[in-house]
Image (cartoon, grey):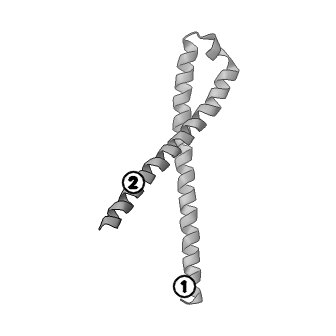
Amino acid sequence: MNQSGQTAAGWLSLLLGIAGASTSALITAAMLLVNGSLTLVVLRTLRETGNAFFAREGVLQFGLFVIPVVLCTAQWIAWDILTGIVWKEQSELDADE
């Protein structure tokens, strides 16, 4: 392979890496937005029930920061587990052929 072929392959690899990282960042941002919105609705509902614990501003701020991040992390872990299972099954099927 000549020098230009190696350079083109290097640029393609770089662009694919950037596209993958950008896609991952966009998906994470969307998950944080949805998780944050759901968390806000749940915490506001709990606050309106009259529970003194959820009426405190510190609890609300802590929950609005931590819960969406924990949910996002759990969603990525679940995605990794599911794709691992699918890829493992697919590779076993390919090995049997």
Which of the two residues, 92 or 13, is positioned nearer the viewer here?
Answer: 92
Above or below, comparing residue 46 to residue 20 in the picture: above
Q: Residues within 10 Å of mark 1 (few under 14, many from 20)?
A: few
- Name the outermost residue toward the front: 96
Side of 58 where 75 appears, left or right: left
- Name the outermost residue toward the bottom: 2
How far apart are the alpha carbons under marks 2 and 1?
34 Å
Above or below, comparing residue 45 to residue 65 in the picture: above
Tell me the kind of residue under disc 1.
Answer: Gly
Residue sitting at 55 percent across and 80 percent down? 8
Residue sitting at 56 percent across and 27 percent down? 40
Q: Which residue is mark 2?
A: 86
- Name the outermost residue toward the right: 58
Provide the secondary structure element on which disc 1 rests: helix
CB atoms at circles 2 and 1 under 8 Å apart?
Answer: no
Of tags 2 and 1, the one toward the viewer is 2
**Badge 2 or badge 1: first in the primary sequence:** 1
Tell me the kind of residue under disc 2.
Answer: Val
Name the disc covering residue 5, or none. Answer: 1
Residue sitting at 29 percent across and 68 percent down? 97
Provide the secondary structure element on which disc 2 rests: helix
Which of the two residues, 49 or 95, is positioned nearer the viewer here?
Answer: 95
Q: Residues within 10 Å of mark 2 (few under 14, many from 20)?
A: few
Name the disc covering residue 78, or none. Answer: none
Total marks in image:
2
Above or below, comparing residue 72 to residue 24 in the picture: above
User: Measured from the top left, where is residue 39 in percent x and y?
Assistant: 55, 28
User: Measured from the top left, where is residue 31 in percent x and y?
Assistant: 52, 41
Residue sitting at 55 percent across and 17 percent down? 46
